[in-house]
Amino acid sequence: MGASNHSHLSPNRWDLFRNRNFRMLWASQAVSQIGDGLTKVALLWFVYQLTGSALKMTIIGLLQTIPPLVLSPIVGVYLDRLPKKPVMVILDVIRAFLIVLIPVLYLFDALTLEVLFILVFFTAVFSTAFGPALAASLPLLVKPSELMSANSLLQSTTNMGILIGPAICGILIAWLGTQNVLYVDAATFLLSALCLLPIKGHLLTTAPRMANVASKVSQDLAVGMQFVFREKPILRALLITTVFYTLGASAFIYVLPLFVNDHIEADPRWLGWLWSAMGAGMLATSFGLSCVKNLGQNNRIFLIALSMVAGGGALQFLAHSHSVVWGFILVTLIGASTAAFTPIAWSIIQETTPNHLMGRVFTLINTASMAMASGGMVAFGGVADNFGSVAGISMIGFVFFVTGMVVILLNRSSFQGEWLLPWKKMELSAHDDPKRVWSPVRISCSMPLSIHRSRRKNHLWMVDISPYSSDTKPNISPKRGSRAPPWSRKYT
């Protein structure tokens, strides 16, 4: 049966939670993301109390950004060689140890600013490997048709962390004190590791490697880059789209406080409510996407582009709005539109990339994202400082809108459900009859491409075109007992 390019709603939106392995992975991430929400607030507040310097707070952010930029490509090579579950468990335990050292050293008056910076840096180093390991493990736990739903549900844990973490942190700081909140965060990392332990199956084994891949890190890294930039155009296109998406999305987080203060002239407490509105929009999109199954690749790319156009339009309206009410509505829409990108893009990458390259592909994309995030913060922050926050918001909206429209225009012929492709050229063996006539073959756009038909005279062949693997030739088998053709073919 051919893969459909139409979306279908799951009979039960929580079907994935019947999968015990996915359920434990989701629980692990839910706990961990809430802990991250605690850390982001508690750590910055702790540094400010310790130093009284806003500059020292920005150094914390810089130390958390450098490791992903520098180490991600190398980390990806080793992730592809290691079993994912032990890696994630060990990383959670190490991060728990590093976080708990901060309040312990503070308790014994042994915590200096330099030591704090070192602990934050190494926590970021080990966090660099966790995200790609998580993304690479998901295709081993769920069916290909469930990847977008699974990614959406995992992203919902991030949104829950944004909504719940800071609120809980504020209560805990008032109740326990800033440094003691870090004990709670360390406990969430340990609880996350405990949730991962019951997972069974493929995550326990080392990913297979291609026979022709050299053992040197540099060569393994080159294989991953070649796969993205030369062998899979869709990954190259997603990488470029990710760059522009991250360029704008990262900057919006830093420009919004200036916009609220300078343009809307609202009380600072309204900024917190706007963040909550954005998180609510993101959470709604995550749960909405988790209900959609079997959506074709081209339709998913169209959905990414459409969400960027909608987000860009909402940003333009926000830039020229002075109303707090309209601000809530538009920021909610912006949150909903930005939340569509990650689960859709990640599901396409997971479907297209073989397991032995998954770590390298995700770390390569994460590296590009982090680099552009830093560039976006500098570029749009400079625009906001020199020309005002309205100009900064407008420019971010312009980047979103133009990127989405370009993706739509470049792929407009592919958004019609399926392609009608003639065989352009075929390589025939010596036993082939060159007079054979082939009719066009209608190929579904969804991934993985499975069974399709081709008719020659009275013979009906079933063609299985699988995603990229070590064997890239289509598998052609006869239907109803017909003899298999003595030829092979490949696309040129």
Image (cartoon, grey):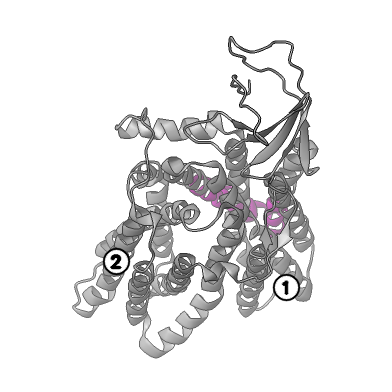
Res 475 → quadrant: top right
Dot 2 falls on a residue whose secondary structure is: helix
- Percent from the top left, x then y, of residue 276? 62, 75
Query: Against 65, is 220 above or below?
Result: above
Q: Out of 54 and 146, give the one closest to the viewer.
A: 146
Q: Is residue 231 above or below residue 55?
A: above
Residue pointed to by mark 2: 93
Residue sitting nearer the eye, 216 or 114: 216
Instruction: Please state which amino acid type lies under the numbered disc 1.
Output: Phe
Residue 426 colored in magenta in the image: no
- Residue 365 coordinates in the image, percent (x, y): 51, 44
Predominant SS of the magenta segment: helix
Q: Which mark is residue 457?
A: none
| Residue 62 in view of the camera | no
Mark 1 vs mark 2: which is more N-terminal? 2
Identified at 36% across, 70% down, the residue is 189
Q: Indicate yes or no whether the magenta region holds residue 387.
A: yes
Q: Which residue is mark 1?
A: 328
What residue occupies the far front of the structure in this picture?
Answer: 481
In this picture, which residue range is highlighted in magenta? 370-397
Whether residue 313 is visible, yes or no, is yes
> Eyeballing the image, is 111 above or below 424?
below
Q: Residues within 10 Å of mark 2 (few under 14, many from 20)?
A: some
Distance from Cα at disc 1 to Cα at disc 2: 39 Å
**Residue 165 place in picture, x, y as percent:** 49, 76
Residue 8 figure quarter: bottom right
Q: Nearer the viewer, residue 339 or 65?
A: 339
Secondary structure category for the residue under label 1: helix
**Quadrant of the drawing holding the C terminus:** top right
